[in-house]
Image (cartoon, rainbow, N blue to C red):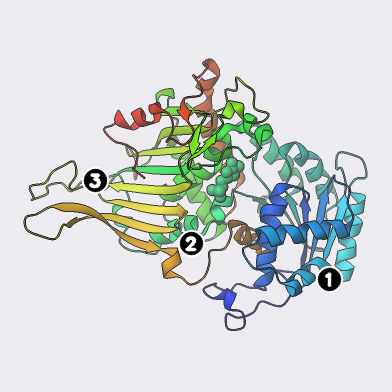
Amino acid sequence: MTEVASAQENPLLEGLTMRRPPDPCALTIFGASGDLTQRKIMPALYSLAVRGLLPQRFGIVGVSRTAMTAEEFRERMKEAIVEHARDDFREDVWEQLAEGMCYVAANFGEEGGEEELIDCLNGLDERRGTAGNRVYYLAVPPGAFDDIVKAMGKHRTTAGWTRLIVEKPFGHDLQSARELNELVRSYFDEDEIFRIDHYLGKETVQNMLVLRFANGIFEPIWNRVFIDHVQITVAESLGIEGRAGFYEEAGAIRDVVQNHVLQLVALTAMEPPIDFEAESVRNEKVKVLRAVHTPGPKHVVRGQYGPGFIEGEEVPGYREEEEVAPDSQTETYVAAKLFVDNWRWADTPFYIRTGKRLPKRETTIAIQFQRAPHPPFQIDQEGGLRPNILLVHIQPDEGVSLAVGAKVPGQGLSIRTVHMDFLYGGAFRVGLPEAYERLILDCLLGDATLFTRADEVEEQWAIVDAMVAPWRRDRPHFPNYAAGTWGPAAADELLHRDGRSWRRH
Ligand code: BG6
């Protein structure tokens, strides 16, 4: 790899705040033959390499149970990059990356499975100068964590630093998350553990903090006095994409609410941190999660999609998906009304919803302000003056838009809602980096700000456990929404009862 270049030397760096280059190190990916490695991790590494952001002395070790040679592994990784990377394929960049790549077929449950890996890492230290610095990336199902953590914990080098990246799901409830935390912390210190929630790597999610804390106009009104309520939507038109084995156990609440949605709640509701250091930011997020009031069963709605149409294409219902039980009780949709019980937010609802097979992919945070107290106009309340909404588009069409009332040109005084828009695509020349690029680079730099801390993940599970507890007692009437619609009727009622409705799309 080349040393970090300047924006003049490398136009792809335009707009990037340059940080120090990471230390030399070797990155070991457990689960190297899996989907995540091919679709996200390897393309992200390639894009970092294209920008000269990887250390000059760097090595990658792929580990999985699949038997293949190092050459076959490199070939697979090359194909993955060609297919999934956001940058065009460049032979020179690939050659440099591939030179430091090796592969180990190992099963860590078996005695001695790790010997070959240790040899390989020692070899990289000699050949590539990786200086005993290690990153272990666990891109494997949770069942495999135990053996790998123990094996790598026992073989720590004294020469350099060690870091552990752990993919979600981090446990399946509070108890299992605690056990997992105990396990990893018996071998690694908390500042060596990087629990991934890829939502935190998204530019627009980070922009939520910038919007709030780098602008003087929002914070004074960012509270229960001026905000009527908040709506957080994580909608997907995709189904479960052949992941029935995982999804049947997880459902929407463990797959998306426990991590991504609760992160968005925390970032929206948190107090300003004193600085942008990992501990300060995470302290504030944990305080929000602690303040989340356990929603009663009437405030939580779950759904499962039946057959329907997505963009004119007929799609099967969840129970008809491959390897899903024909009477599955797994939810593919969750909506809930949460309260953050603190001085800033008391009595201000945070409505959240997420679902598969909704009409479109859309992640937004909508901050709805109180209506103007006394409009001095004759207006038609229905179609005329609506409350101001600050809409943060996490994806797609990344940006921020503010809905305001404006006078319709002409005689008389009619008012219509218009939007003041900031669109990433229009304002900046550079493409948005993939979340995984940011997160992998941060880990190489030892910056844990955008990773979930042990107590944070436990607070998230405590909320989810409380939400699912009543579910054990009754059998839902599933399916209760058709694919291609905005979820079950009960989700609309949840807001109608409060005289509100979900934002129209
Ligand atoms: C993952 C979930 O964490 O997030 C998936 O396991 C979901 O089910 C995905 O599709 C959504 O991520 P994104 O970045 O496409 O919004």
In percent of width and height, residue 346 lies at 33, 39
- Tell me if 69 is positioned left or right of 216 in this view: right
Label 1 sits on a secondary structure element that is: loop
Residue type, numbered disc 3: Gln
Q: CA distance from mark 3 to mark 1?
A: 60 Å
- Give the mark nearest the N terminus, 2 or 1: 1
Q: Single out the mark in the foreground, 2 or 1.
A: 1
Q: CA distance from mark 3 to mark 2?
A: 30 Å
- Give the mark nearest the N terminus, 3 or 1: 1
Can residue 394 be seen? yes
Q: Which residue is mark 3?
A: 370
In percent of width and height, residue 23 lies at 72, 69
Total numbered badges shown on the rendered structure = 3
Identify the disc placed on residue 129: 1
In percent of width and height, residue 224 lies at 30, 44
Which residue is at a point 57% across and 80% down the rendered structure image?
7
Can residue 459 be seen? no
Q: Which residue is mark 2?
A: 275
